[in-house]
Amino acid sequence: MTARRHSHDLIAQLPATRGGYSAGVSLADLTWFRVGGPAEVLFKPVDAEDLAHFLRERPRDLPLTVIGVGSNLLVRDGGIPGVTIRLGKGFGSIAVDGESIKAGGGASDVAVALAAQRAGLAGLEFLRGIPGTIGGGLRMNAGAYGSEMRDVLIAAEALDGEGRLHQLSLEDMGFGYRHCSIPADWIFTGARLKARPGDAGAIAARMAEIQASRETTQPIKSATGGSTFANPPGRKAWELIDAAGCRGLVIGDAQVSEQHCNFLINRGNASAADLENLGETVRRRVFEASGIDLHWEIRRIGVPAVSNENLEVPQ
């Protein structure tokens, strides 16, 4: 059946938690693309203990999906079956600890950069250019402006699918380009990031440069999802897209940005299918033009909008 018709039945099967369950929540309202269907059930744990309890007591066959601020996320039009976990305020803590920053998995990258600047700590300015959360940054080794998460990580914390807490070293993370080797069902709940003493004014100036660069080169005032494709080894995705004639390409109300063609934008009434089809069209044209297979950097989740009652999540 559809996600919406099953929501209240599913909630009745879930463990009692301090966080709230909500049925049929529109995820278009929670993602930067402003598209996508509902979460069958949305769960907002109060803190890591609440989340661990849920993971221990939940039905074992329950599909789980974790989201942050939705900045690098495309939710398909049929929504997300099972429980979608959104880390909120209880995971947004940020604390200065000597020459390091301790941050919750739900803390925004920008907020961490600003906290470091106020404390006169340098080395985290690049986070000003990443519109996501620390947890998402750990999952994909997020990077920008010459640095990435593996350059600053001291240690991370994560809950596995059974609710057990793990302390992870930099080596444990197995970082690669836009990748880590931690199991996909583990949920990052916090991290300690290294920094170094610096001049608060100089740090603020560098962060202002980063923001100005984003405003000049990226469609940040549009409904977008950030960089669409990872850069192939030794190449720039946007150059390959441009060379394949895809700048400004439109499907439905989805468009390849004229300003930066590794960004897709929702011009106002795009569906998730429009955006995903546009991305796949770009991939096909780039491959035909260059022989290079682009890989999605945007995380695509959920199911397409379908009329039948057998929902399968595309791989």
Image (cartoon, helix red, strand yellow):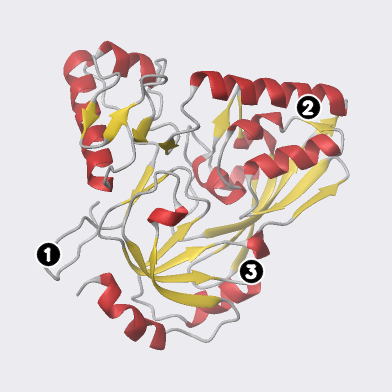
Of circles 3 and 2, the one toward us is 2
Please give the name of the residue rendered at 73% of the width and 22% of the height, measured from the top-left corner.
206
User: Which residue lies under the disc numbered 2?
Assistant: 204
Position of 154 with respect to 202 (left or right) is left
Which three-letter amino acid code belongs to the residue tagged 3?
A: Ala
Q: CA distance from mark 3 to mark 2?
A: 32 Å
148 w.r.t. 180: above or below: above
Please give the name of the residue rendered at 23% of the width and 53% of the height, measured from the top-left corner.
314
Element on which disc 3 rests: helix
Element on which disc 2 rests: helix
Residue 216 image position (x, y, % from top left)? 54, 18
Which three-letter amino acid code belongs to the residue tagged 1?
A: Ser
User: Which residue lies under the disc numbered 1?
Assistant: 307
Front-most of residues 124 and 141:
124
42 w.r.t. 228: above or below: below
Badge 1 or badge 2: first in the primary sequence: 2
Badge 3 or badge 2: first in the primary sequence: 3
Position of 236 with respect to 206 (left or right) is left
Element on which disc 1 rests: loop
Please give the name of the residue rendered at 61% of the width and 55% of the height, measured from the top-left corner.
106
Which three-letter amino acid code belongs to the residue tagged 2?
A: Ala
